[in-house]
Image (cartoon, coloured by chain):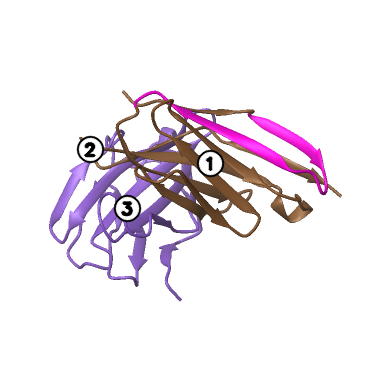
Chain colours: A purple, B brown
């Protein structure tokens, strides 16, 4: 089944403890990105990647890192999480950056709570 | 800066009704528009993708239209069912600049049995 898989689905952590949220897609998509969803603010892009070893900042990149060493994986790294990073996170992928062929496919989300 | 607005924010209808959800965007220079469904605490499920050159797309009981010149899209749901209850999001892909979708805040739909 074609899908974007995120892990973990739920995570509670303490301020300052480094964490990684994994994202993997099995559709051979070149483009991947991370979004966060907050009440009243909607979904906002954190980082995106056009292809292996090519990443760039989205609208809200502060406090996050990403890497794209393999085409299928795009982990989101929080080096020193803070409570304002408590949010619902989504990974998305598409065949092309424009989503021209089949649009964007989203993962099921990771609900992160930082205390 | 692209802004996407969805009206109404919430909608409650009895089962069987046909309904229309609205999405408007400020910059008509879009590449495509995508409608998603989101169930509480869950991920986004793609419903329909409309390229900028298209006027509408249909999938089952769903029909989405796009009027790029006026900056509007509508999602028509025929014969609504309780299982249609969810939040519906529209998102536009900008034609230039950063590769990001700009999302509306969504319409929360409740279909009463």
Figure label count: 3
Query: Eyeballing the image, is B34 above or below A38?
Result: below
| Label 2, residues with CA under 10 Å away: few <14, some 14-19, many ≥20 | some
Query: Eyeballing the image, is A31 above or below B15?
Result: below
In this rendering, the label closer to the viewer, 3 or 1: 3
**Mark 3 near mark 1, Cβ–Cβ under 8 Å?**
no
Image: magenta residue range? B9-27
- Is disc 2 on the same chain as disc 3? no
Magenta segment: does it hold B90? no
What's the residue at 25%, 42% (across, down)? B99
What's the residue at 31%, 53% (across, down)? A100
Q: Position of residue B81 (x, y in %)?
A: 77, 53
| Distance between mark 3 and mark 2 Cα atoms | 13 Å
Q: Position of residue B6 (x, y in %)?
A: 55, 30
Q: Position of residue A1 (x, y in %)?
A: 46, 76
Q: Is residue A19 left or right of residue A109?
A: left
* Chain where mark 2 sits: B
Name the residue that disc number 3 marks: A99
In this orientation, which residue lies closer to the viewer: B39 or A6? B39
Q: Position of residue A88 (x, y in %)?
A: 48, 45
- For marks 2 and 1, the one nearer the N-term is 1
Magenta segment: does it hold B22? yes
Q: Is residue A69 left or right of residue A17?
A: left
**Mark 2 near mark 1, Cβ–Cβ under 8 Å?**
no
Query: Eyeballing the image, is A74 above or below A1?
Result: above
- Can you name the residue that lies furthest to the bottom here? A1
Q: Is residue A77 left or right of residue A112?
A: left
Name the residue that disc number 2 marks: B98
In this rendering, the label closer to the viewer, 3 or 2: 3
In this orientation, which residue lies closer to the viewer: A80 or A49? A49
């Amino acid at each position: 089944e074609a899908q974007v898989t995120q892990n973990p689905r739920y995570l509670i952590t303490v301020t300052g403890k480094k964490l990684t949220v994994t994202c993997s897609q099995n559709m051979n998509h070149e483009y991947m990105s991370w979004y966060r969803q907050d009440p009243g603010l909607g979904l906002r892009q954190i980082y995106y990647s056009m292809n292996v070893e090519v990443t760039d900042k989205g609208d809200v990149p502060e406090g996050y890192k990403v890497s794209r060493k393999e085409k299928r994986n795009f982990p989101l790294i929080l080096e020193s999480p803070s409570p304002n990073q408590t949010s619902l996170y989504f990974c998305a992928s598409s065949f092309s950056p424009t989503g021209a062929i089949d649009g964007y496919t989203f993962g099921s989300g990771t609900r992160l709570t930082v205390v | 800066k692209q802004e996407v607005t969805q009206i109404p924010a919430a909608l409650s209808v009895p089962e069987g009704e046909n309904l229309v959800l609205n999405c408007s965007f400020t910059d008509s220079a879009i590449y495509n528009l995508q409608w998603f469904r989101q169930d509480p605490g869950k991920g986004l499920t793609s419903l329909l993708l409309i390229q900028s050159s298209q006027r509408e797309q249909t999938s089952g009981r769903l029909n989405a239209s796009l009027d790029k010149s006026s900056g509007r899209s509508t999602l028509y749901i025929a014969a609504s069912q309780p299982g249609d209850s969810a939040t519906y999001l529209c998102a536009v892909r900008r034609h230039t600049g950063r590769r990001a979708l700009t999302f509306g805040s969504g319409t929360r739909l409740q279909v009463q049995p």
